[in-house]
Image (cartoon, rainbow, N blue to C red):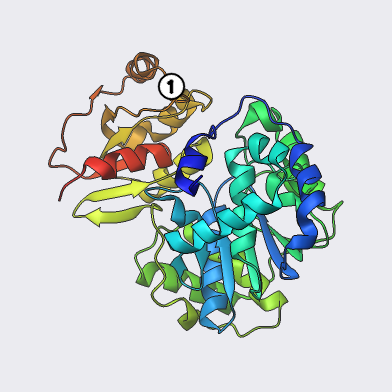
Amino acid sequence: MKLTKFLNKKPLFYKEIDYDRMPKCWNKIRDNFKIPKKIVHIIGTNGKGTTGRFLAYYLYKMGFNVGHYTSPHIMKFNERIWINGKDTDDESLEKAHQKLQQLIPKYYVDRLSYFEYTTFLAMKCFEGLDYIILEAGLGGERDATSVFDRYMSLVTTIDIDHQSFLGNTIEEIATTKLNSIKTHAIIGKQIHSEVMQISSHYPSFLEFLNENELNQIQNFIKENNFASYLADNLALSLSFIKRENLEFNLDHLKGIELKGRLQKIDENLYIDVGHNPLAARAILNEFKDKKINLIYNTYEDKDYKEILSILKPIINKLFIIEVENDRIADKNKVIKTAKNLQIEVEEFKKLENHPTLIFGSFSVVEKFLRNYEK
């Protein structure tokens, strides 16, 4: 069975996860993989994708062979498996898929989740590289990506999200994420003191860039018109570069593209794949003292009342876009919540001549882009 058809039969989301399945399967097939020793594992709530891409691109431009596994994708699955500057092509994915079909016992082929299977697919594509940048999907300790030996973990900002799987407090969420640390970790910028207290129990370092290097990062972000919140992610990536005793030179990042991170796609039109209160606070900071139209939708398990409350000061008008997804929130409940917050809201039909942001998840951005014409 071809990869696309095979993955289409796998659910993208599970209400319950069998955490034993992935490690058991890996133990049966691990001898059939030639995986690099330098796996950099990225854990946290927000910023994992851009932290990983900054690091992968930098190492690639230095001359290393690098793979970056990220999720989810916006438009095409290939975006999840990036090697040496570009998304993996269909042919390479299909070859890796066919090899996996021969390696993995049928019992596990049938039962592995979409994310578990595609994690193995990425690792098969990454054989023989110098570095793998491996982004955790959900949590850390029992995430599918945690079955592999890690050379170093990078910890992005940790906040409340995915409570049904990770816990309802910062202590619980931080613990399950930080429990994935195998050898050493670099702790990025945090907003909760509890995270720093818990991290002290692990073999970890704080970011250790000097003032001149931090100023260079800020200037790079401004000069490339990136969202200011990306400076923290870049700083975490470059802390690893320094830890490796590699050259600190931001010229290695020239030409990098960061899709869906407050990305300007047209005059007064932006997309951002953020989907939780932490992302909403970053957006609020980017558009402070301005009013924007917000094209929005969200998953049922997201705290959209909190998200809309955070964004209210910058919202001119809220537009709810239809998204076909089993996890999507009840449209009428979102509209009612917005009205209760005294936010003007209506269903999205067409763009108005006003600065506009599409925000709420990868699915929201994908739906908009598939129908958008400049």
Note whether 293 is above or below 334 in the view shown: below
Residue 163 in percent (x, y) is at 64, 29
Residue 221 in percent (x, y) is at 42, 67
Where residue 308 sits, quadrant-wise, is top left
Q: Which amino acid does label 1 sit on?
A: Ala
Which of the two residues, 145 or 284, is positioned nearer the viewer here? 145
Can residue 13 be seen from the camera position used here?
Answer: yes
For the point 15% across and 34% down, the residue is 350
Dot 1 crowding, Cα within 10 Å, few <14, some 14–19, many 20+: some
Residue 218 in percent (x, y) is at 47, 69
Q: Read off the residue under disc 1.
A: 329
Tag 1 secondary structure: loop
For the point 36% across and 69% down, the residue is 224
Where residue 17 sits, quadrant-wise, is top right
Query: In the picture provided, is 332 more to the left or to the right than 200?
Result: left
For the point 39% across and 62% down, the residue is 226
Query: In the picture provided, is 181 more to the left or to the right than 299?
Result: right
Residue 206 in percent (x, y) is at 73, 63
Which of the two residues, 222 or 269, is positioned nearer the viewer here? 269
Query: In the picture provided, is 314 more to the left or to the right than 145?
Result: left
For the point 59% across and 75% down, the residue is 211
Number of marks drawn:
1
